Image (cartoon, rainbow, N blue to C red):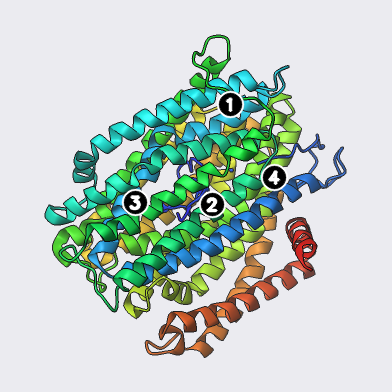
């Protein structure tokens, strides 16, 4: 995911992540997002279970408390800044290598660091540690001993994992991609430059969770900005020195080691910088952290018990994406040579980064804040507060993600052109893939939030069970996609993602209702229906306006260049957003003010 979520950011149980997202930082590439996805916290006080009254804190049930909204706004603004830069980075990457064999090989290799981190450690770091750190922070030493031992164990473990994976890069790429011959050799070279990211993803996640558990969100939300700035600078240097994909087509035969240093080296350097910027804010917490070995007497045994199930969940879930990686690289492995007429993993990653963006900017920010609130409520055995936090997160998130799903379908054309490198064929491939994925975008966020409740209660076994069910569906549909003609494989994988995203929250809801009882499902559904009606009206207006930009014609203005598509996107996207907000205001939807007021307030405070 340029970072998500993110990382989102984040184990993303049962939902398909973007093939290139980085945990809580890259825009969900096989964003399990966290570009950083794919991640922070304010305790919501007890509220009565009745969903239409005011609770003890004076916050209407089903909406975010002001402190939670402010924390969500802080994260959302930081993530938005990162996403804007991530957009620019993706555009630059498209100009550099889109439509070439290099794009497929680089994307396949860059997929691995994020996937391996999530496969081995991401779920434990992102879903398990906050409750444990929150508990430890109540100790007389504010958790210093626990966190010191935790960081020591994590750093040593990550270093060992990274070294082993780099030693096995050849067999791993040979097994899980369809690359062969010189293509595989170049993928291995890319891998040696990119795989050190595993260690720094882990370090970023560990330090970020320490900050989150102590209600310090700003640095974690803004660190991915540093990553994107470094990556953009590297791509600019690459284009200046090596030329664009259109002016100087890049092939395996004419590729040089110097180009690898620039393209892959700066990608890893960005992740290093992203991790390093968290060291100072962690130091400012005053915990006096030091390297400490040994687990006895720290309570890490309880952490390990929960982590075992979470690790199983991540392994089972991400094995699916190893299969997806192999299927997504079939077009190049089938000797199409990076034919821009056939969609490839580059197309799938760009479309995935786009569809996961609403989740990374809004849902992940809200879920991160509310997750800590849920963890504190669960620790107090306050089931009413837990249900209220969940309902508020689902309704506020839904207001953004339902509109985003419709908007992504309508605007898939101009969005696809942004990352095409000015190649209309590549732009259309991204647009079609994005339109398929966008249908599942709201469901993805719903499922993510539902699963956070299990982890807040230190129940990692139930998500493991859910993941096993979803893996069966995901593997079946991905393997079916591999049987399609090469030009349809990527579209088949996108459909597989969407089907899994739609089914996953249904399965999670069944399990959660048994454990939590009624958490206001009727009101949540009613709110989402109102969101959908407003979004459809805005979508129809957007589609009609987009036709004025030539969307219906293969030679229309919108398809002529990146600049033309950006203009269409700005005009039509703004129109749709205004119509949507006005309709919601007319319908007196409380979530509009709950989500927008903190954001607008912070923006006004920063204006001269």
Q: Residues within 10 Å of mark 1 (few under 14, many from 20)?
A: many
Residue 392 at x, y percent in the picture: 71, 47
Mark 4 touching mark 1, by CB under 8 A? no
Placement of 451 over or under 233, stated as above or below: above
Instruction: Look at discs 4 and 1 and give the one toward the viewer.
Output: 1
Mark 3 touching mark 1, by CB under 8 A? no
Q: Residues within 10 Å of mark 3 (few under 14, many from 20)?
A: many
Q: Quadrant of residue 41?
A: top right
Kindly identify the residue that appears in the image at 39 percent across and 55 percent down.
Answer: 266
Q: CA distance from mark 2 to mark 1?
A: 28 Å
Q: Residues within 10 Å of mark 2 (few under 14, many from 20)?
A: many
- Which is more N-terminal, label 2 or label 4? 2
Residue lying furthest top in this view?
296
Placement of 41 over or under 559, stated as above or below: above
Q: Quadrant of residue 421?
A: bottom left
Q: CA distance from mark 3 to mark 1?
A: 32 Å
Of the 4 image quadrants, the one containing the N terminus is: bottom left
Q: What residue does disc 2 label?
A: 224
Mark number displayed over residue 391: 4
Residue lying furthest left in this view?
181
Instruction: Look at discs 4 and 3 and give the one toward the viewer.
Output: 3
Name the element at disc 2: helix
Name the element at disc 3: helix
Name the element at disc 1: loop
Q: What residue does disc 1 label?
A: 458
Q: What residue does disc 3 label?
A: 110
Of the 4 image quadrants, the one containing the C terminus is: bottom right
Instruction: Look at discs 3 and 2 and give the one toward the viewer.
Output: 2
Question: Is residue 5 visible in the rendered structure shown here?
Answer: yes
Residue 204 at x, y percent in the picture: 51, 40
Q: CA distance from mark 4 to mark 3?
A: 37 Å
- Which is more N-terminal, label 1 or label 2? 2
């Amino acid at each position: 995911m340029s970072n998500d979520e993110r990382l989102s950011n984040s184990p993303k149980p049962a939902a398909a992540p973007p093939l290139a997202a980085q945990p809580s930082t890259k825009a969900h590439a096989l964003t399990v997002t966290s570009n950083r996805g794919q991640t922070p916290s304010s305790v919501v006080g007890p509220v009565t279970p009745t969903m239409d009254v005011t609770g003890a804190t004076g916050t209407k049930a089903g909406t975010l408390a002001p402190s939670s909204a402010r924390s969500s706004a802080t994260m959302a603004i930081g993530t938005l800044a990162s996403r804007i830069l991530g957009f620019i980075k993706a555009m630059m990457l498209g100009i550099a290598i889109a439509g070439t064999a290099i794009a497929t090989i680089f994307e396949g290799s860059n997929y691995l660091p994020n996937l391996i981190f999530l496969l081995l450690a991401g779920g434990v770091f992102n879903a398990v540690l906050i409750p444990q750190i929150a508990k430890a922070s109540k100790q007389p030493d504010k958790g210093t001993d626990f966190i010191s031992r935790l960081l020591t164990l994590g750093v040593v473990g990550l270093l060992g994992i990274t070294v082993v994976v780099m030693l096995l890069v050849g067999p791993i790429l040979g097994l899980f991609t369809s690359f062969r011959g010189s293509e595989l050799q170049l993928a291995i070279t890319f891998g040696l430059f990119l795989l050190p990211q595993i260690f720094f993803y882990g370090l970023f996640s560990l330090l970020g969770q320490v900050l989150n558990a102590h209600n310090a969100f700003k640095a974690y939300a803004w660190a991915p900005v540093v990553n994107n700035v470094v990556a953009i600078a590297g791509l600019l240097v690459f284009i200046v020195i090596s030329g664009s994909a259109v002016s100087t087509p890049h092939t395996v035969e004419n590729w040089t080691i110097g180009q690898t240093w620039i393209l892959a080296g700066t990608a890893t350097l960005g992740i290093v910088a992203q991790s390093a910027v968290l060291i100072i804010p962690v130091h400012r917490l005053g915990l006096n952290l030091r390297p400490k070995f040994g687990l006895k007497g720290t309570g890490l045994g309880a952490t390990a018990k929960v982590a075992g199930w979470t690790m199983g969940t991540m392994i089972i879930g991400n094995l699916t994406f190893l299969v997806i990686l192999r299927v997504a690289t079939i077009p190049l492995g089938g000797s199409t040579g990076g034919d821009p007429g056939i969609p490839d993993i580059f197309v799938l990653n760009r479309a995935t980064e786009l569809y996961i963006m609403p989740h990374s900017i809004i849902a992940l920010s809200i879920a991160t804040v509310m997750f800590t609130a849920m963890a504190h409520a669960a620790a107090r055995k306050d089931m009413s507060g837990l249900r209220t936090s969940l309902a508020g997160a689902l309704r506020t998130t839904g207001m953004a993600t339902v509109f985003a799903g419709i908007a992504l379908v309508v605007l898939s054309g101009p969005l696809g052109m942004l990352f095409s490198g000015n190649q209309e064929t590549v732009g259309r491939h991204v647009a079609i893939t994005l339109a398929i994925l966008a249908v599942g975008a709201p469901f993805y966020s719903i499922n993510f939030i539902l699963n956070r409740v299990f982890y807040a209660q230190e129940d990692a076994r139930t998500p493991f069970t859910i993941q096993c069910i979803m893996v069966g569906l995901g593997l079946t549909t991905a393997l079916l996609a591999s049987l399609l003609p090469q030009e349809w494989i990527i579209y088949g994988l996108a459909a597989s993602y969407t089907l899994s995203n739609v089914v996953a929250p249904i399965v999670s809801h069944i399990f959660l209702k048994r454990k939590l009882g009624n958490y206001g499902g009727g009101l949540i559904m009613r709110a989402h229906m109102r969101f959908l009606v407003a979004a459809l009206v805005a979508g129809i207006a957007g589609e009609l306006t987009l036709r004025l930009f030539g969307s219906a014609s293969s030679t229309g203005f919108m398809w002529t260049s990146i600049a033309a598509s950006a203009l269409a996107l700005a005009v039509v996207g703004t129109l749709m957003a205004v119509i949507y907000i006005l309709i919601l205001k007319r319908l007196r939807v409380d979530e509009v003010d709950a989500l927008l007021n903190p954001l607008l307030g912070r923006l006004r405070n920063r204006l001269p």
